Amino acid sequence: MPLAALAGTTRPDPERILPAMSAPKQNRPKARLPRGFRDRGAAEIMAEQAILATIRRVYESYGFEPLETPAFEYTDALGKFLPDLDRPNEGVFSLKDDDDQWLSLRYDLTAPLARHVAANFQHLAKPFRRYQVGSVWRNEKPGPGRFREFTQFDADTVGSANPAADGELLMMLCDTLEALGLKRGDYIVKINNRKLLDGVLEVAGIPLEDRERRGVVLRAIDKLDRLGVEGVAALLGPGRKDESGDFTRGAGLSPDQAHRVLAFVAPDAKDEQEHLDQIATLIAASKVGAEGLAELEAIVRLLQAAGYGPDQVMFDTGVVRGLDYYTGPVWEGQLTGPVTNDAGEEIVFGSIASGGRYDDLVARFTGQRVPAAGISIGVSRLLAALKDRDAALVPLVVVTAFDKNDAAPGFAMAQELRAAGIRAEAYVGTGKMGDQFKYADRRGAAIAVVEGPDERTKGEVTLKDLALGAELAKSVESRAEWVANREAQKSVKRADLVAAIKDMLGR
Amino acid sequence: MPLAALAGTTRPDPERILPAMSAPKQNRPKARLPRGFRDRGAAEIMAEQAILATIRRVYESYGFEPLETPAFEYTDALGKFLPDLDRPNEGVFSLKDDDDQWLSLRYDLTAPLARHVAANFQHLAKPFRRYQVGSVWRNEKPGPGRFREFTQFDADTVGSANPAADGELLMMLCDTLEALGLKRGDYIVKINNRKLLDGVLEVAGIPLEDRERRGVVLRAIDKLDRLGVEGVAALLGPGRKDESGDFTRGAGLSPDQAHRVLAFVAPDAKDEQEHLDQIATLIAASKVGAEGLAELEAIVRLLQAAGYGPDQVMFDTGVVRGLDYYTGPVWEGQLTGPVTNDAGEEIVFGSIASGGRYDDLVARFTGQRVPAAGISIGVSRLLAALKDRDAALVPLVVVTAFDKNDAAPGFAMAQELRAAGIRAEAYVGTGKMGDQFKYADRRGAAIAVVEGPDERTKGEVTLKDLALGAELAKSVESRAEWVANREAQKSVKRADLVAAIKDMLGR
């Protein structure tokens, strides 16, 4: 009869008893969320569930299989975040395990994948294609809309250098966005290749090994939107003085070198073909550049053959984000239309997915270079962008309890309704009828059911149409409640409960 | 064109670059999981997804709404785990935020609920009925099958002292277990009430305030299964010497007191009614005991009226787990049948859900007592118990790539199959045909599709039935591969691809 206490099963053990409730006021903890974290309610969670289910369905139809890794990894396995005793938490949440090893919460889903592949390399069917969805944590300064915990949805193909692997990820992203209800023209997937820029820099005489200068060039290019061609040109050359008079030192390229870089990222070509021709000319002398072009061509050829058009995936040399991290093709999925934010303002949403080819991650562990490519969907941002498209919640029926000491009749009605596929609850509180109607309103219920002594005598129940009631109460200034109540309710035979409610919900 | 770097969207920023892959061997991190954590693969994740979807569906049909709280809470909000500089990680994973406040990962979903309710009390429709599913973390010594991260699924009703709220949770648990495929008799929900034991102890002359002695009594009762009545009697009295000669000090009850306690937990009644009568007699003089009995009766009456029988929910005074934590009724869902574990051994699974009424949690923050009740399902254990019932994975078709430089024909076939609702992937690796068949085998694919030059000339494709092939290869000792290959494959017209595969999968 007594039950063994087993981890993972149940509520806190008796040993975990909280301090007695009678703690004096000054000792009570404050009920507050940690900085940069948040609670999420029904509407958002349900919308996210629907999105995740759609992504899962598409990814699984492609034969990608789910993988889950734990929240924690050994800190050294995560990468650059080697703990030092002064600032073990730089960028990630870290703590020391009781055997003195440092643990960190994952900050993305790629580093754990690399660890998983390195540890299980011999046992995996390769190419290993997995998806993973989950929370990631970043120990950063929180800000408006910037949280320290959020959801990512990744798909990666490990163990193939074939451009078909890249093409597949891009098709899958397009299929997913369209399965989520986006139309062609609502989104665009842009692709680029790090090797092209490498080629341009090489031809311009900047060695690939000069990482520092390459970094300055990348950061300059990334400011094209904000500073325009002239501003970027200054940053590629000697440097730039901003409005406040502050001077940012540039990459120190010669005018000719800067021109080549600008021709790459901010082309003056009249169409894509001319742009590609310009690039081919620009990088003619660079082996790595030619490689990059060939890779992109193979991907585009496959996409075209599979029926994906330039209104879905397009070449764009302006995609530079992560160029230093990825080793070949990079891509970024963007929403093209404006979206209304919480403040009611129209904003351009931009990036909702990104990824590329990274061939070095597993080598960190094994020394062996393993080709890989991936795509990551920012679920929170996608959710915000799709908010306007949310399906309405399934309507709810609240069955009130006239006699709060006899819940059985209400439960019987709720059961019947649920059995008919209707979301229904019997009131389980201890409030009076007025409280119960207020409760039903706050719950956003569509209908409240009442069975008082009068109704029971007559074998009837009263159905209150709460939406209609609210509507009527709004339009009639005086006598509002009375009229609203009268028009928005009706009595039906108890035996007709389910049919009558289906009828009301169907309206 | 350039894209703003935004949190939550995308892969690691360029700034997050990992150390160069050329790191010398001695500097390479080991690819290993932290102690007590694990990776989970496709079969387990998909089975768990199916279970979670079922629980969600039942809970939502009752009108429970989802809530999500973050992984972190302020340590003081979690309860007893007040950080001290020597052992901040006792039981929970804790770390200091950069503003010097202690954060802890949630160890269950109830403490965050209490924080949420206390912080939002005025805005919630009460009773507030929410469900939450998610990972919880315990900083405990890991062991076989004992992990430091696992999934819980909780439902709680906050703000109602009505026994209907308890009854609803129990009905919902029964409905959920049956929706998961368990039959009546496969499971049982046992209920008890802490107030009954309080009454027994009170009548026996042990004051409720004597928490230490009550603790010794509870721990003694919890050992009934292992030690039997005599052993427990010794532990209730002066103490007990075990086989090794070690002496455990007892609760020091008199023989009469111990007899009363034993009569409660290990009744010699011939049926449940007689047991209830014995208890009623035992606690006749105790107000709190009578209260407990009345609460149980109200719950049982409601369950009976709603059609839930004693083969689903039964009274059992042996349910003592958490009696010190809960303040009224407690319940525990158990599987009754044996289950085969990973080692192939039959084990009795026991508890897969538990809960009860706890009225003190919110008061920790506000000083105001708020009645609440909940149920928690241990998803990992339920998953293990239901493993034998797993639906088979959706069958997979692998379309091989005869010419690895031309992936388009294979992608076209995979697309057609997916459009017809068949899970299909085009091979995206760089292996030869033999590697591709091995890959398809390791992926557990049902069918491999081949379109070589011969087939293409004839407008055909070859379909290899991998399951049948494996079967044939098993039964024929010699010539095995040749025969298997011949009998397990056939050629069909390219135009008939989808129909032929549907036909093969349908067999």
Image (spheres, coloured by chain):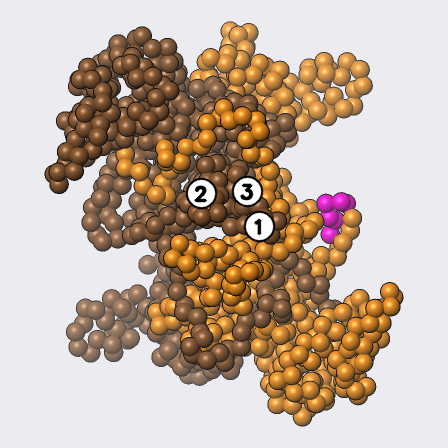
Chain colours: A orange, B brown
Q: Is residue B300 visible?
A: no
Q: Disc 1 to disc 3, how far (Cα)?
A: 10 Å
Q: Disc 3 to disc 2, how far (Cα)?
A: 12 Å
Q: Which residue is mark 1?
A: B97
State whether residue A171 is above or below residue B37: below
Label 1 Cα crowd, 10 Å radius (few <14 / some 14-19 / many 20+): some
Q: Chain of mark 3?
A: B
Give the residues drawn in magenta, as a range: A339-344
Mark 2: which amino acid? Tyr
Q: Which residue is mark 2?
A: B107
Observer-side mark, 2 or 1, equals 1
Q: Disc 2 to disc 1, how far (Cα)?
A: 18 Å
State whether residue A237 is above or below residue B68: below
How many marks do you count on the picture? 3
Q: Residue at x 67, y 93 (%)?
A: A285
Instruction: Kindly indicate whether the residue at mark 2 contacts the one at mark 3 (C-beta within 8 angstroms).
Output: no
Q: Which residue is mark 3?
A: B74
